């Protein structure tokens, strides 16, 4: 098959970029298909694929997205692909659409935040979300798709209720994970060198946080919870960078008196050594459709604490293969969950084993194979 994957990002630092990379590798390397990547001009690219780089109007963030929306659609109508798979809004109506998240769900969650937390979401950010509604909605209108792949039950239910998408047009298909790369046995030898690099003693209990956009992903509440548990030998290893508020979060750790316990490691193209170095994973995000970092942590044999507002709660059983905080802004609840992992080693070990076992059902080969089956179904 001649397959076009349409994405705004093909970077390993981007969640969507990594998903598209994994699917492209599976289609080309294991199944021998002809894979084409449609992405904005100037975006990071890698691998032996046919790239179609879409020139953008670079005046503002909105004009960049709008120009990609219209121009990528024009290219797809000119070219004769067997299958078009959209991972970004696009003015094209005959493809498979993966819904990686919905702006309207994000805005709905912002409205549920307390007044003080809503102030943390800038007005300009909210306006940009609302301005993007027509473009974000385009591929979910009647006739705007051949099939929609929803990462989570929340997304599927919203597509059915808000957009009135027919139930038979939506397939629940989550993200996958590389079970070889993220494997506790394979990662073991990287544990001590990574800890040593960041001044973490072998006896320090280390929670790992991986992600950018610290505000949305709840890092402030992770820092506050760390301060509440009052255990000096506990560390919070932060991998990622906030392009806007980095210094603010570093200052917040000082304000909470845990600056020596919070380690800001910066961005990394290879996060595997950090999973190896950690004892548990912490991700109290306000909203993430289906965060890859949770899957990678579980595959790496780490017990995780995550928010009920992440799509990975679909595969979590609270207290069995992970812990779920109902309100990511509640540092008290988060601290209680952290103490469970700190003080109950038997439960922690059982949870870690169950987390790995859960992820063995979600390899990229399994997800890629099912996606190809869907491609064939829509061609009949």
Image: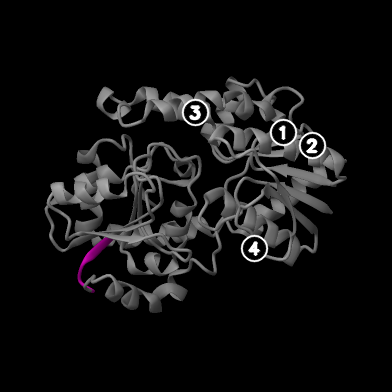
Q: Earlier in the sequence, mark 3 or mark 4?
A: 4
Q: Earlier in the sequence, mark 4 or mark 2?
A: 4
Residue at numbered disc 3? 128
At 60% from the left edge and 27% from the top edge, which residue is drawn?
Answer: 159
Relative height, residue 54 to residue 303 (above, below): above
Q: Earlier in the sequence, mark 3 or mark 2?
A: 2
| The magenta segment | 202-206
Observer-nearest of 26 and 72: 72
Q: Label 3 vs label 4: CA separation? A: 30 Å
Q: Judging from the image, what secondary structure is the residue with disc 2 in?
A: helix
Q: Quadrant of residue 331?
A: top left
Asked if marks 4 and 2 touch (Cβ < 8 Å), the reply is no
Q: Label 3 vs label 1: CA separation? A: 18 Å
Residue 345: x %, y % from top left: 25, 62
Residue 350: x %, y % from top left: 35, 60
In what quadrant of the picture does the C terminus appear? top right
Residue at numbered disc 2? 74
Q: Label 4 vs label 1: CA separation? A: 24 Å
Q: Judging from the image, what secondary structure is the residue with disc 3 in?
A: helix
Relative height, residue 209 to residue 183 (above, below): above
Residue at numbered disc 4? 46
Mark sitting on residue 70: 1
Q: Main secondary structure of the magenta part?
A: loop
């Amino acid at each position: 098959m001649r397959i076009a994957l349409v994405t705004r990002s093909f970077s390993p630092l981007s969640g969507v970029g990594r998903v598209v990379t994994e699917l492209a590798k599976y289609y080309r390397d294991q199944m021998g298909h002809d894979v084409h990547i449609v992405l904005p001009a100037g975006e990071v690219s890698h691998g032996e694929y046919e790239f179609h780089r879409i020139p953008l109007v670079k005046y503002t963030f909105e004009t960049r997205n709008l120009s990609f929306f219209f121009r990528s659609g024009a290219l797809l109508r000119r070219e004769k692909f067997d299958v078009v798979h959209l991972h970004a809004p696009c003015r094209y109506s005959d493809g498979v659409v993966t819904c990686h998240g919905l702006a309207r769900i994000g805005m709905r969650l912002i409205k549920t935040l307390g007044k003080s937390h809503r102030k943390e979401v800038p007005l300009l950010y909210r306006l940009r979300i609302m301005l993007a509604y027509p473009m974000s909605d385009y591929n979910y209108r009647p006739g705007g798709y051949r099939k929609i792949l929803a990462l989570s039950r929340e997304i599927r239910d919203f597509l059915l209720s808000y957009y009135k998408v027919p139930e038979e047009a939506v397939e629940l298909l989550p993200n996958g994970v590389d079970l070889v790369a993220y494997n506790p046995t394979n990662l073991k030898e990287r544990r001590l060198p990574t800890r040593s690099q960041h001044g973490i003693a072998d006896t320090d209990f280390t929670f790992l946080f991986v992600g950018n956009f610290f505000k949305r992903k709840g890092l402030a509440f992770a820092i506050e919870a760390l301060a509440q548990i009052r255990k000096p030998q506990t560390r919070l290893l932060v991998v990622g960078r906030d392009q806007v508020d980095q210094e603010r979060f570093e200052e917040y750790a000082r304000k909470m008196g845990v600056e020596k316990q919070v380690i800001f490691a910066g961005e990394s193209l290879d996060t595997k050594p950090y999973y190896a170095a950690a004892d548990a994973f912490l991700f109290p995000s306000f909203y993430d459709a289906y965060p890859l970092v949770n899957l990678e942590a579980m595959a790496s044999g780490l017990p995780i604490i995550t928010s009920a507002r992440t799509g990975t709660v679909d595969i979590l059983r609270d207290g069995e293969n992970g812990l779920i905080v109902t309100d990511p802004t509640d540092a008290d609840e988060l601290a209680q969950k952290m103490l469970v992992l700190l003080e109950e080693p038997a439960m922690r070990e059982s949870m870690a084993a169950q987390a790995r076992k859960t992820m063995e059902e979600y390899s990229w080969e399994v997800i890629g194979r099912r996606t190809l089956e869907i491609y064939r179904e829509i061609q009949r």
